[in-house]
Image (spheres, rainbow, N blue to C red):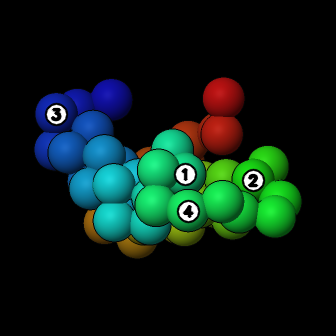
């Protein structure tokens, strides 16, 4: 993974509160899965790479 891809991914994770610091969430695993889907979609759109969630 290139540096630019990592910066994009970290930016999305910070923006949508991946670590859950901004409040109690009823179902954190579903929420994190949705966030990771956004990350994968964004990486594909911007860089043409498919990355798995792992």
Residue assigned mark 1: 20
Q: Mark 2 to mark 1: distance in Å?
A: 8 Å
Q: Mark 3 to mark 4: distance in Å?
A: 30 Å
Foreground tag (3 vs 4)? 4
- Marks 4 and 2 close (CB-CB < 8 Å): no
Q: Can residue 24 be seen?
A: yes
Q: Secondary structure at mark 1?
A: loop
Foreground tag (3 vs 1)? 1
- Marks 2 and 1 close (CB-CB < 8 Å): yes
Q: Mark 4 to mark 2: distance in Å?
A: 11 Å
Foreground pick, 27 / 38: 27
Residue 49: x, y in percent? 45, 49
Q: Secondary structure at mark 4?
A: loop
Number of marks in picture: 4
Q: Can residue 48 be seen?
A: no
Q: Earlier in the sequence, mark 4 or mark 2?
A: 4
Residue assigned mark 4: 23
Foreground tag (3 vs 2)? 2
Q: Secondary structure at mark 3?
A: helix
Residue 1 falls left or right of residue 44: left
Residue assigned mark 2: 28
Q: Quadrant of residue 1?
A: top left
Residue 45: x, y in percent? 40, 70
Other residues around mark 4 within 10 Å, as few (<14) / some (14–19) / many (≥20): few
Residue under the image location 27 percent in, 39 percent down: 6
Q: Mark 3 to mark 1: distance in Å?
A: 25 Å
Foreground tag (4 vs 2)? 4
Residue 10 falls left or right of residue 35: left
Foreground tag (4 vs 1)? 4
Q: Earlier in the sequence, mark 3 or mark 4?
A: 3
Residue assigned mark 3: 3
Residue under the image location 16 percent in, 33 percent down: 3
């Amino acid at each position: 993974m290139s540096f630019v891809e990592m910066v994009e991914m970290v930016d999305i994770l910070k923006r949508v509160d991946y670590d859950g610091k901004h409040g109690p969430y009823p179902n954190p695993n579903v929420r994190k899965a949705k966030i990771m889907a956004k990350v994968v979609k964004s990486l594909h759109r911007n860089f043409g790479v498919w990355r798995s969630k792992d």
